[in-house]
Amino acid sequence: EGSTLGYWKFSGKEDPAADSSKFKNAGTLRGAVWNPEGKFGGCLEGFPGYPVDDKPHGLLVKRSPHLAPGGAFTLEMWVRAKDEASFPPEMTPVLVDSKYVPDNHTGFMWSLTKDSGGGQRLFKLEIGLGTRSQTWYSSPVTLSTAEWQHIGFHYDAQGTASFFLNGESVGSSLQEGAGPMAGAIRDFCIGDRIGSLYRGFPGWMDEVLLSEGLREYRPVGIEPDSSRPVFLRFSENSSLNFKIQNLSSDEISKGEVPIAIAGETPAPPIDWSPLKKGEAREASIPVDAGLRSGFRTGEMKDQNTPPLPKSLS
């Protein structure tokens, strides 16, 4: 929960760039156009930028401290992508930007990576921390050309960024040492990069909401205690530790969490129910520290020489 910092509904043709929050951070159409057929009334329509057309295709909002919160914040919106002819695989469109260039360590940029095949891309979040910047990525996502989808992320100002698609988690990770975002020194741009090379979003955007705090869509949150756990080789009682928390508004009476380490046999599901509203519980799964991930015990030749993959042995 938290207060609304910016809310662009694009509901009226006369004033499509109005901000419905109490801060009234109205924008200016800069290449993007108002379209009457949005998810909820009107919407913002964007077009492909570089390398198709290196021109502005967004909505520009004047810099404000409310648009670059120093604490936890959430950004969400509804989107519908255009077809591949207007959304070529090599494009890396920007959804929201107040950072612009890599050496500006203030503000943030939320964008999409190139199409890795089959329409799949990653959400990419870059946040300026003052003296450096940090980057987070989501799991692969596919943006629909036929239906509106709800997308969003939140950042806890302590190193963890989480991404969402239609209310479902599509990745959450902790970057050790990352802290609050540094206040932006540039304007706030919706649907494009602030400047050239312009990277407009070729599609439609509606109900762009920036809010203070962490807005949750998941019924259950799972957070690791470390972004890169390290284990002493052959140490006993090694485990991956994490926290399971009920994020819903009611008690969850029954549930299991299946967890697997890449290349290893999945561990039995963890039964963590019941969980009261807001309750958190510590959990762990054992790790065989005697092996490199992906190798079974029977393949080890000795403790000092790791085995070759079967294709090489």
Image (cartoon, helix red, strand yellow):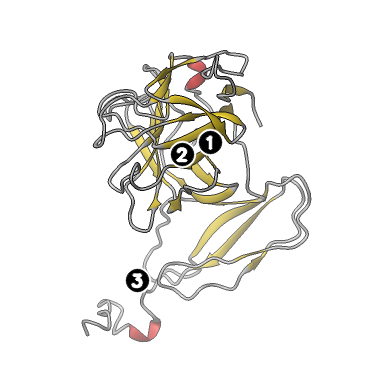
Provide the secondary structure element on which disc 2 rests: loop
Which numbered disc covers residue 292?
A: 3
Helix, strand or loop at label 3? It is loop
Q: Where is residue 88 in the image (x, y as percent from the top left)?
A: 31, 46
Mark 3 vs 2, N-terminal side: 2
Which quadrant would the N terminus be assigned to in this image? top right
Q: Can residue 72 be seen in this view?
A: no
Q: Name the residue nearer the viewer: 90 or 259.
A: 90
Q: Is residue 288 above or below residue 78?
A: below
Real-space Cα separation, disc 1 to disc 3, in angstroms? 33 Å
Q: How crowded is mark 3: few (under 14 residues within 10 Å), some or many (20 or more)?
A: some
Q: How would you rate the neighbour count of disc 2 (Cα within 10 Å): few for under 14, some for 14-19, many for 20 or more? A: some
Inter-mark Cα distance, 2 to 1: 7 Å
Q: Which quarter of the figure has residue 50?
A: top left
* Vertical arrangement, residue 237 with respect to residue 23, above or below: below
Give the SS element for disc 1. Answer: loop
> Can you see residue 249?
yes
Label 2 sits on residue = 159
Q: Where is residue 290 in the image (x, y as percent from the top left)?
A: 38, 73
Q: Name the residue tied to disc 1.
A: 156
Disc 1, disc 3: CB below 8 Å?
no
**In this rendering, is residue 19 above or below 159?**
above
- The disc, 1 or 3, on the residue closer to the chain's N-terminal end is 1
In which quadrant will I find the C terminus? bottom left
Q: Nearer the viewer, residue 48 or 112?
A: 48
Q: Which of marks 3 and 2 is in front?
A: 2
Task: Report the Cα–Cα distance between label 3 and label 2.
Answer: 28 Å
Report the amino acid beneath label 2: Gly
Nearer to us: label 1 or label 3: 1
Are the residues at dot 2 and dot 1 in contact (C-beta closer than 8 Å)?
A: yes
- Which amino acid does the dot numbered 3 rest on? Arg
Residue 127, percent from left and from top: 39, 32
